[in-house]
Image: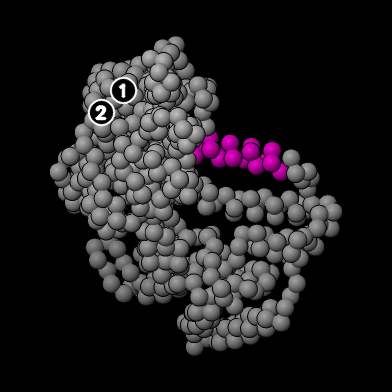
């Protein structure tokens, strides 16, 4: 297991009037190479959870292990941890600051103390992986479009060549086309490099098609943790916590109730279409 | 880390001090600060400390919370104390190598430290117990006479309330950006002062950009709601003095008289 969270609790502003419990008793194990979706309503503790995984926040109680080592240990090298567990924050384009795109992407690997050649090679590779057109590499990051800025920011983390990549709502505020492009690129990244990926989102639709496993968060604890089709079976309970299953789930369940013998577990539009065809005997 | 700065932040709790009219708190704080500079002996400082402590107790803001705000000015405090301690001429107390500490130096250093500490705590009580909106309301009201000499009182108050409102927002933003850059391997803590100053660039540039963006959005939102300055603008909650406010003014005047009379006696 690459990443283990053992009974993690987190309380914000502990000891003051404003103390709020953000996480309670989180137990998770994440194996290498898995593509995990973390879903929850606003304020369910998703962002707090992922900030624990690269040591930006310390658990109030409980332990976190990365590759068998407790990251809260005093002599643990947290800077090294951050190069292995890459975290892309929400609206990551707000962190861009350099004069051109390429230099900005170099910031991460440069902080790792690599030599100049290696830094530039990594930056170049990262920019290629996120599919940014080459003629933009030496433009000011502030002149790019929203989607392009987002790619540059993701490249900034990728350039550190992390083993685990965590993305906090990477599609927030993008149009449907930009959303799909980014998600598809993340998926192919996982296939190519075998990287472990954690994708935080509040949209089931976004996640259903790409992930191997879904973790549903509600009020600071884990509600469900299973493969997508199993999680979506609880679509009624999901609604109660302000989430929804993908629309195909509703259609499939409705069809089933009307007497069409379909398997209601389809999670993507393609699966659903195949299933309906099968039910009608059109292969 | 960044949340430790309490200077200029409101602490929400129900208390007598919180309920007071902002004008009383503003005037009281101002008079308290002036009084600190009028004392000639330690008795004055003692009375000021007693006054301050009773206000702290009444405000029900945890003392711990106030002291946390002091951390940010600790450096300034230390420099002031050091300068006064080593550079005041007078009767020598101790001499080590070329450095002389004088009796006068010790005295001034102590008074300066007491003054600064009480000044900061005194003014942070005001901001901790008054919402920014209330505070600027009070200011606007108190400065109203200046309108006669064409001072744009309302506009100044509006600018102040916006500035105050943005403190927590920008703090949060700074925290976010800091974390994002930490996640990219940035290091803000090691190295000498120049390296550390340089390490601030990845925080400052995005912070400025976001501040401009927010200012732009805010201006747009205000215009969309037909904001056009103070002329003819009414208040939703006009400030009215209550009995408690008059009593508070009484206490402030009483404090001022006692502390100045006793604080200026030459021993």
Contact between labelled residues 1 and 2, with CB atoms less than 8 Å apart: yes
Q: Is residue B105 above or below residue B155?
A: below
Same chain assignment for discs 2 and 1: yes
Quadrant of image for the C terminus of chain A: top left
Where residue B89 appears, as percent x and y from the top left, is 40, 68
Q: Does the rendering let one see residue A61?
A: yes
Secondary element at tag 2: loop
x 53%, y 75%: residue: B59
Q: B152 and A220: which one is in front?
A: A220
* Direction from residue B173 to residue B264 in the image, left or right: right
Q: Which mark is residue A189?
A: 1
Q: Residue B50: within the magenta?
A: no
Query: Which stretch appears magenta?
Result: B200-223
Which label was assigned to residue A195?
A: 2
Farthest residue in the left direction?
A68
Chain letter of the residue beneath label 1 in the structure image: A
Quarter-wise, where is residue A151 in the image? Answer: top left
Say few, some or many: other residues with alpha carbon within 10 Å of mark 1 (under 14 / 14 to 19 / 20 or more).
Answer: some
Residue in the picture at 25% in, 28% down: A195
């Amino acid at each position: 297991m690459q990443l283990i969270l053992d009974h993690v609790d987190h309380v914000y502003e502990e000891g003051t009037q404003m103390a709020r419990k953000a996480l309670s008793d989180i137990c998770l194990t994440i194996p290498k190479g898995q593509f995990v979706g973390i879903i929850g309503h606003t304020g369910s503790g998703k962002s707090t959870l992922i900030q624990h995984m690269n040591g930006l926040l310390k658990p109030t109680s409980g332990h976190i292990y990365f590759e068998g080592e407790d990251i809260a240990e005093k002599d643990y090298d947290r800077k090294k941890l951050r190069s292995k567990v890459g975290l892309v924050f929400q609206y990551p384009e707000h962190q861009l600051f350099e004069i051109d795109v390429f230099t900005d992407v170099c910031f991460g690997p440069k902080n790792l103390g690599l030599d100049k050649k290696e830094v530039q090679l990594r930056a170049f590779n990262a920019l290629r992986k996120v599919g940014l057109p080459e003629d933009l590499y030496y433009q000011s990051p502030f002149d790019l479009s929203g989607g392009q800025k987002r790619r540059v920011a993701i490249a900034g983390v990728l350039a550190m060549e992390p083993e685990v990549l965590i993305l906090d709502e990477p599609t927030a505020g993008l149009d449907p086309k930009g959303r799909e492009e980014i998600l598809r690129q993340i998926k192919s990244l996982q296939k190519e490099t075998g990287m472990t990926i954690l994708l935080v989102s509040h949209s089931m639709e976004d996640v259903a098609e790409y992930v191997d496993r879904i973790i549903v968060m509600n009020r600071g604890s884990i509600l469900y943790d299973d493969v997508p089709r199993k999680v979506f079976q609880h679509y009624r309970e999901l609604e109660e916590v302000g989430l929804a299953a993908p629309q195909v789930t509703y259609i499939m369940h409705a069809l089933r109730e009307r007497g069409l013998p379909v398997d209601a577990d389809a999670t993507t539009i393609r699966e659903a279409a195949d299933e309906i065809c099968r039910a009608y005997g059109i292969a | 880390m960044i949340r430790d700065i309490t200077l200029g932040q409101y602490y929400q709790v129900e208390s007598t001090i919180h309920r007071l009219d902002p004008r009383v708190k503003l005037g009281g704080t101002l008079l308290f600060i002036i009084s600190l500079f009028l004392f000639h002996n330690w008795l004055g400082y003692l009375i000021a400390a007693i006054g301050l402590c009773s206000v702290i107790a009444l405000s029900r803001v945890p003392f711990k919370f106030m002291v946390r705000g002091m951390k940010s000015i600790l450096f300034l405090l230390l420099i002031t104390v050091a300068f006064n301690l080593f550079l005041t001429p007078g009767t020598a107390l101790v001499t080590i190598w070329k450095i002389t500490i004088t009796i006068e130096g010790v005295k001034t250093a102590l008074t300066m430290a007491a003054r600064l500490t009480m000044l900061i705590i005194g003014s942070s009580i005001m901001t901790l117990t008054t919402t920014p909106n209330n505070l600027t309301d009070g200011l606007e009201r108190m400065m109203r006479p200046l309108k006669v000499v064409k001072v744009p009182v309302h506009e100044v108050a509006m600018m102040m309330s916006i500035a105050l409102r943005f403190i927590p927002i920008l703090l949060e933003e700074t925290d976010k950006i800091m974390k994002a850059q930490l996640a990219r391997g940035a290091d803000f803590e090691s190295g000498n002062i120049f390296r550390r100053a340089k390490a601030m660039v990845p925080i400052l540039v995005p912070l400025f950009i976001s501040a401009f963006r927010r200012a732009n959005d805010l201006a747009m939102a205000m215009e969309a709601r037909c904001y056009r300055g103070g002329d003819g603008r009414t208040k939703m909650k006009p400030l009215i003095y209550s009995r408690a406010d008059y009593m508070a003014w009484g206490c402030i005047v009483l404090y001022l008289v006692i502390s100045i009379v006793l604080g200026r006696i030459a021993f």
